[in-house]
Image: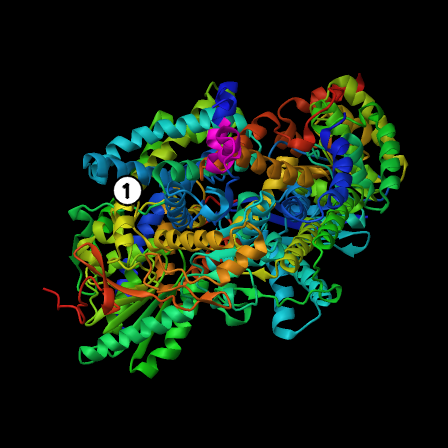
Amino acid sequence: MSTALLLSALVGGLANGAVYALVALGLTLIYGVLHIINFAHGSLLMLALYASWILWSALGVSPYVALVLLAPLFFALGYALQRWVIGPAGQGRDANVLLVTLGVSIVIDNLALAVFGPATRTVDIPLATSTIDLGVMYLPLPRLIAFVAALLLSGGLWLLLNRTDLGRAIRAVARESDAARLVGIRVAHIHAVTFGIGTASVAAAACLLLPSFYVSPDAGYAFVLVAFTVVVMGGMGSFPGALLAGLVIGVIESFSGLWFGPSLAPIGIYAAFALVLLFRPTGLFGARA
Amino acid sequence: MLDVVDLHRRFGGVTALSGVSIAVRQGSITALIGPNGAGKTTAFATIAGFHRPDRGQMRFLGRDITGWRPERIARLGLVRTFQIVQPFGRLSVRDNIAVGAHLHLARRASALTEAEAVARRLGLAADLDKPADTLPIAGRKRLELARALATRPRMLLLDEVMAGLNPAEVAALMPVIREIRDGGVTLLMIEHVMQAVAELAERCIVLAEGRVIATGTVAEVARDPVVVDAYLGEGAAARLADHHAA
Amino acid sequence: MMHAKQGSGVSRRRLLAGAGAATLGAPLIAGAAPAPVKIGLLQPLTGFLAYDGIQGKYGAMLAIDEINAAGGIKSLGGAKLAPVLADAQTSPATAIAEVDRLAGEGVAAIQGGFASDLVLAATQQAARHGLPYMVDVGVVDQIVGRGLTNTFRFGPGFGKVTQDGLANLAALNNAAGKPAKTVVIVHENGAFGSGMAKLLQAKLPGLGFEVVATIGHPTPQRDFTNIALQVKQANPDLIIPSNYKNDYILMALTFAQQHVRPKAAIYSILGGAASNAPFAAQHPKESNYIMDCNHYYDPNKPLSKAFAAKVAAKKWDLTYELMLNYSVMRVLADALERAASTDAAKLTAAIAASTYSDTIMPYGPTKFVHGQNIGAAPVNTQIRDGVVEVIFPTAFASAKPVFPIPAAG
Amino acid sequence: MTRWGARAGPPLLLMLGALPFAFPSGFVLTTATLLLLTAILGQSWNILGGYGGQSSFGHALFYGTGAFTTALLQVRFGWNAWVAAAAAIGAGTLVGAAAGALVFRQGLRGSYFALVTLAFAEIARVLVASFDITGGGFGLLVPLHRGAASFQFSDPRLPYWIAWTVVLAGVLLTIGIERSRFGARLAAVRENEDAARALGIAPVQVKTVCTAISAGLAATAGVLYLQIFLFIDAANGFGVGVSVQALLAPILGGLATPWGALLGALALRLMAEMVHAVAGGLAGIDLALFGVILILILRFAPGGIAGIRLRRDA
C-alpha cells in the first residue's frame, strides 16, 4: 500500500467526513433538544436536494446561492412539521414520535417519487467538476467548500446555542422542559424552532452536497444511518462532537475500505460505533453520565 | 447485625465519606442524623451497594458484603428506600408492592395477596388499584416503605420516610415503624424530623462532613457540644432540651 | 358516461384507480364490445428500483396503447388490452402477494418483474396459478432453468450477455492489435454485481486479459474517490464496471474528476447507466466513449424509429427497460391473437410456439426453448458526444467503435 | 376500564383461524400469511420494546439469524428442515442473549440501545452479503421438496395455520409474561431500575432474558418466512426494513398489550388495501397516503389501537 494511497484515503475520508458531519448537524440538534430519533431526516435531505436541483435547472441558480434561499424556507417547513404534525401526533411518547417521523418520511419519499419522477438528477456547474491537484489526488472543490462549511456551520450553531437568548432557551428546554415551562418558556414553540433550525441545517447540507452527488427519491437513504452514527458517536446535541465524529467516521470508512474493500467498509463504521457506545456510552464529546 | 468499618468514598474531588463506621444491633432502631451534605444518603447508597466504597469493609449477618451488587445485598435481606421516592409510576400500588413480594414468592397470586396484606398494614388498602404516580406524597412515602417491607427484609435502611409529611401524617406513621421493628426487622433510618428520631430511635449516629462525630442516645448526642456546634447550631441544644421537657 | 354523473366521489375514485379499473365499466359504455383482456404489469413502482419499474411500465403501456388503437386483439373480436398495475415494491414477498392479487383479478398473463429476486418469486407463484409469465429483464440464469412451464424470458440472461460481452470485447481488442491486457473490475456487491465479477474473473484470463484488481462496493456507495484512486493506482488498460444506475453515474463522474482514464476503455457489461440516454446527454464529457454490453434495440428498424419518436414526444427516457417491455408486450399480444383465447393453457402454448419477429429488439424470430428466447442477444453501445450509439453487431451499428479511446488531450 | 384490544383480539384471531375455509388459496390467504408473519415479528418486538421498555432498531438481527440459520443448515449441511428450524430458533435466542448481555452490561438504554442494535444488525447484513457460505449477494434458495417432512407444503393453508398457531402462542406467551414474576420484574426494571435493584432484582439479567425470549420469537418469524418463500438474502433477512416492520405493528396496535401487535399488523394490512383501492395505479401517491393515515391514527389513538377505550370508566 503506497503512501500516496494512504494519504489520499485520509484526505478523501476527511472530505467525506465533513459531509457526514454537515448532514448530522441538524440531526444532533433535534436529537439533543427534543430527544427524538428523526427518521425523516434523510427524506428532508432528499427534499432539499430536489429543491436545490430545481432552482438550478429552472433558474440556473447555483446550489451555493440556493443555500441562502432554501435555509429559511426549510426552517419554515421544519417549524411547521414539528409544530403541527410531529408534536401533536407524537404526544410526547417516544415510540409514537418515532412512528410519526417514519410516517413523515414515507409521505415525503413517495410524494417526491410521484412529483419528481424516479430519475437520477445531477447539477452541471463548472464548480462541480473543478478540482485542486494535491499530487496524490484531485480534491474536488465542492468537497473543500463542504469541509469549510462544516466548520463554519458547526461553529455558527454552537454560537447560536451558547451566546444568544434563543440558544439559552433551547438549552433550558433540552435539559428540563418542565422547568423551562415553569419559567415561562413556550416549550412547543422552542421545540418547533429547534426542529426548524435542524431542518434548515439539512437544507444547507443538501446545497453543499448536491454539486458532488446526485438526487433521486431514494438519495437520502445513503446518509441516514451514517448520520445517526455520527450523532451518537459525537454525543447527542454536541456540534463539535458531530464534527469530530463525522471526520472520524469518514476516515474510518476510508481506511477500512482501503484495507478490506469498500464492500466491508460499513462494518468499520458500525463496529467503531458499537465499540464507542459500549465503552464510552455518552459519545466522544458527551457529558459524562 | 450490620457492621460498617472505616468507609471511604470520594466523588471526583469531593470527599463524601471519610472513615465512617456504623454498627447496628439486631432488633434495634438506629437513627443516622446530620446536617445537609453530611453524607448520610451516600452512606446508605454505599451500604446498599449502589456505590462502591473506595476503602472500608461492610458486614451484614456475618457476611462480608463489600463490593456486592445492590440486588444481591437486597436478596440477603438488607433493603433500602429512597429519599426521593422512586415508584414504578405506571404500575398500580398493588403491582408495586407485589414486585417486592416476589423476592420470596414466585407465584403471582401469592405475591398479590401478600401485597394486599402489606398495603393494609400501611394504610394503603384504599389505593391498591391506583397508578403509583397518582398518589400524594404521603402515599408515595408509604408505598416506598410497603414495597421494601414486602421483600421480608431482615433490615431496612429508611431514607427520610417522614420528610414532607405534615405532623398528623408523621404521627400516623410512627406506630407503623415501631410495629415493623416489633415484627423483627432491624431499622437504620436517616431522619430530619427530630420528633420522630427522639421517639423512635434507641441510638443515634451523627454524621458531619463525611465523618461520624458522635454516637449515643438521642439525649446524649443532643448534649454533645461537638454535635451542637457542627450540626444543630448555636442555641439549638437548649431548644431541644426545652422540647423534651415539654 | 352514466357513471360520471353519480357524484364526484365515484368518478374521482375511478379516475384514481387507473386504467385497470376504468375498463371494468367499458362494456357498459360500448354495449356489445368484447370483454377486455386483462394483462398484469408487475413492476417495482416504488422504492429504490422505481426508475426501472416505471420505465418498464411506460414501455408496456405504450405497446398496449398502440395495439388497442390498431383494433385490439382481432381474433377475440377486437378485444382491448387492459393493463392491471401491480407494485412489487422491492420485496419478493410483496411480489408474491401481488401475483395472487393479479390472478384474483382475472388477468390472462403477467409481464414484468425487472429485478431477478422479484422475478424468481413472482414466476414461481404465477406457476401455482397456471398463469403465463413474461419476464421483461430478470437476468439471473436460474429464472428459466427451473422447469417452470409458464415462464418465458424474451431478453437474454446473464450467461448470454456475459458471453457475448466478452466475445465482443475480445474481438474489439484483437482488431485493434490487443492494446488492452490488464483489467480492473468494479462491481456492486449484491446478487448482480458479485455474480458478474465472479464470472468475469473466471473467463477473462482465457481471453488473454489479466485481472489486476476486483473492487466490490455496497449500494448505494456515497463516494467513489477512493475507488477511483485505487483503480488509478492499478493503472489498468480496461475497467469493467457492474453496478446500479445512481452509483454508475457517481462513479463515472468521479473517474473523470480524478483523471482515471484507462488506456483502452471503460467497458461495462449490464452497466447501470452506461447506455442510459439521459446520463449521456447530461454528461457528454464524462460519459464520452463509455462502452456497454446490454439490452438495447436495433435503432435502424422502421418500428424502432417510430418508437423512439413516440418516446421522445412523451419526454420519456429512452432506456432498455422501456424497449424490452414494449417488445415483450407485442410478443404477448401476438400470442393472444394466435391463441384466440384468454385461457391460460392455450395462451401458454401460443407463447411457447411464438415465432414473432416484429419487435424493436435485434433478435430475429422469437424461439422459446425451456422458456428462454434463444434468439435474444445483447448489443454493444458506446456513448459518443452525449448520444448512445450502437457499435456492435455491425449489421445495425450506428457508429464505428472507438477502441482504444484517444489519449487525454 | 375496557379497552379495544382485549375485546376485539380474541374474536379477530378466531376469524383469522377460520379464514382459510373461505379463502383456501390466492391473494387473501397469501396476504393474511404475510400479516401473521408481521404480527409474530411485532409480538417479538413488543416483548422487548413494550414490556421491557427497550426499543430495538435491530430486530432484523434476530429475524435474519432465524431465517439464515435454518437456510444454511438445510442448504449447506443437508439438515432436516424441522431440526434446522429448531436449531435456528435456538440460535436466534442465543444471539439475543449475547447481544442483550453485552449491551445491558454496559448500561446502554434508550436511543443508545436502539442505535447499537441497529449497528449490530447492519454488521450482520454486510457480513452475510460478503461470504459465499451465506450465499453472498445472491442469498440462499432452499430447494423445492414439497412434503411435511421437509416443512414445505403444497397446500398454502398449512403454513398459514402454523403461523396462526405461532401467533396464538405469542399471545399466550405475552399474557404469561404479564402474569408472572418475570413480568413483574420486567415492568419494575422498565419503570425504575434503581428501585428495582433495591428490591433484589438484577436488571441486566432480567433484560437479557427478555431480549433472548424476544429474539427467539423473532427468529421463529424468520424461520417461517424462509419455509414459506424458500428464499432469503441479506436485505430481506437483516435489512433495516425488517427492523422497521418489527416496530411498526406493535406501536400502532398498542405497546405492552397482548393483542397490540396482531391488531397493528391487521391495521397496516387494511391501510395498504385501502390506499391500493383508492390510489393503486398511482405509484407513490398510494404509499404517501399510507403515511398520512399512519400519522392520523397516532394522532387520534396515541395508546395504539388496542388502547382505544370503549367505555370511559377508568
Q: Residue C123 in magenta?
A: no
Read off the chain for label 1: C
Bin the neighbour count of mark 1 within 10 Å (Cα to Cα): few under 14, some 14-19, many 20 and up. few
Q: Height in image: D169 above or below A186?
A: below
Q: Is residue C217 left or right of residue A66?
A: right
Foreground pick, B145 / B44: B145
Q: Work out which residue is located at the far left of the displayed protein and give it.
A: C409
Q: Which residue is at the front of the view, A66 or C358?
A: C358
What colour scheme does the image use? rainbow
Query: Residue C236 falls in which quadrant of the image?
Result: bottom left
> What residue do we see at 71% from left, 56% from top?
D155
Q: Is residue A203 above or below residue C268?
A: above
Q: Does the image show residue D199?
A: no
Write the start and end of the magenta stretch as one range.
C13-33
Residue that numbered label 1 is attached to: C315
Is residue C85 something one can see in this rendering? Answer: yes
Horizontally, is D138 left or right of B106 in the view?
left
User: Is A264 on the left or on the right of C124, as rendered?
Assistant: left
Task: Please say whether residue C19 is one of the residues in the magenta stretch.
Answer: yes
Residue kind at label 1, given as amino acid type = Lys
Looking at the image, residue A51 sits to the left or right of residue B35; the answer is left
Instruction: Please report the residue visible at 21 percent of the width from the left and 51 percent of the height from the top.
Output: C281
Return the x and y of residue C346 as percentages of the image width and height.
56, 56
Specify the principal SS of the magenta part: helix
